[in-house]
Amino acid sequence: MSGQISPPVSESHAPYSLSRRGFMQIGALGLGGLTLPGLLRAESKSGVRSSHKSVILIYLVGGPPHQDMFDLKPDAPKEIAGPWKPIATNVNGIQICEALPQLARNMDKLVVIRSLVGNQAGHDAIQVYNGHNPSKPTPAGGWPQFGSAVAKLQGAVDPSVPPFVSVCYTCTHGPYNEPGPGFLGQGLAPFRAMGKTRDDMVLSGISVDRFADRKTLLKGFDDMRRDVDASGTMKGMDTFTEQAYGLLTSSRMADALDLSKESPKVIERYGVGNPKVFMDANGAPRVPQSLLMARRLVEAGARVVTLNYSKWDWHGGRNAEGRANNSIFLREAEDFPVFDKCVSALVEDLHARGLDKDCLLYTSDAADE
């Protein structure tokens, strides 16, 4: 992994010359203290451990109000302090919102980073996924997100499990969505586990041996086409094709996405939401089960799992039942307990399974608050 990873030269911007070290340090995860070299170094030092280093990124769409969750101001005037009271956690000197009692009991497993701010005033998801300001010049193709960089440099742990998996739902508000693999190309895009893709991960009416014969035939056609392909499209198609064959000839990925294999007790601990109800219409659904799926994907071999959760950019609007809800504090009372339950469940689950030594759970937002 020596040398440099530099974006292609754009005609409209000066050439970029970005060192490997500099490239690895971009992105919200780098700002939070985790750089890709550090991740790889930790993995190399794991010695006899058979597991892999991984990251679960929970994007809280629109940005939750930190002053009502982890940075309360109880001594401030009422109009600033808000209605929530701080409660003690299991770490001396740290208090958080009273609506988050389960996270308070797990504070010894958490770190609240108060020194980070967005690089621009909007709620665009791009600054969460790759750390760049979307209004500033970008290289041709755009900057890649963190998971795409990991997939490029590390590859798959298991050929049947993509290294970068997205459990994100597509929001109708474009800036809330993941920016993509950028100049690394579509071959490094996340595998999107939601929707119809899941139905395509099984062989229907064909044996694995016959499927392999068809793969050999397809490769022959690809070799003929490659001579006339000058766009690089074939390279990206190769990645998708190999990924598809791995998924179809192994049940590992399909099993990871099948929550029915979990005990009802575990599912209840996380909670379940309706994936068809998009909060405030343009946000993401409030689906606690996505966190459980992320844990299962990491166990199956994914290196980076991203998911989006609910909507936190509150300016009135309606709640999950469609009722008018014009108070930010009413939305907090609605969302905080569900968030408290599912995140604490994931934290406890990672520790109970020994995954805490190899998996970083990172919640992030793109708020200007």
Image: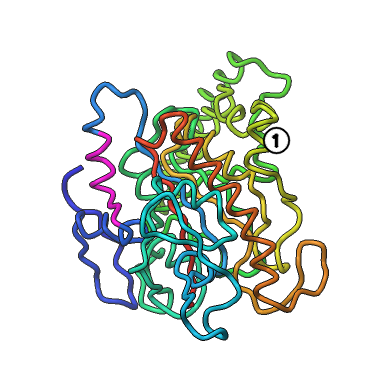
**Badge 1: few (under 14), some or many (20 or more) residues near its Cα, within 10 Å?**
few
- Say what secondary structure mark 1 lies in: helix
Q: Residue at x 67, y 34 (%)?
A: 200
Q: Main secondary structure of the magenta part?
A: helix
Q: Say left or right for 217 vs 155.
A: right
Magenta stretch contains residue 39: yes
Residue 213: percent from left, percent from top: 56, 18
Residue 340 vertical placement versus 31 (above, below): above
Q: Is residue 83 left or right of residue 1?
A: right
Q: Is residue 117 visible?
A: yes
Nearer-the-camera pick, 179 or 213: 179
Image quadrant holding the N terminus, namely: top left
Image coordinates for residue 212, horizontal then vertical, percent? 55, 19
User: What amino acid type is highlighted by mark number 1?
Assistant: Asp
Task: Decide whether residue 9 is among the magenta residues.
Answer: no
Q: Which residue lies at the image location 39% right of the left edge and 47% below the top edge?
A: 108
Q: Is residue 228 visible?
A: no
Who is closer to the viewer here, 145 or 117? 117
Which residue matches tag 1?
Answer: 199
Range of magenta residues: 33-43
In the image, residue 28 sits, relative to residue 257, either above or below, namely below
Give the x, y percent position of residue 123.
52, 73
* Image point (58%, 39%), residue name: 292
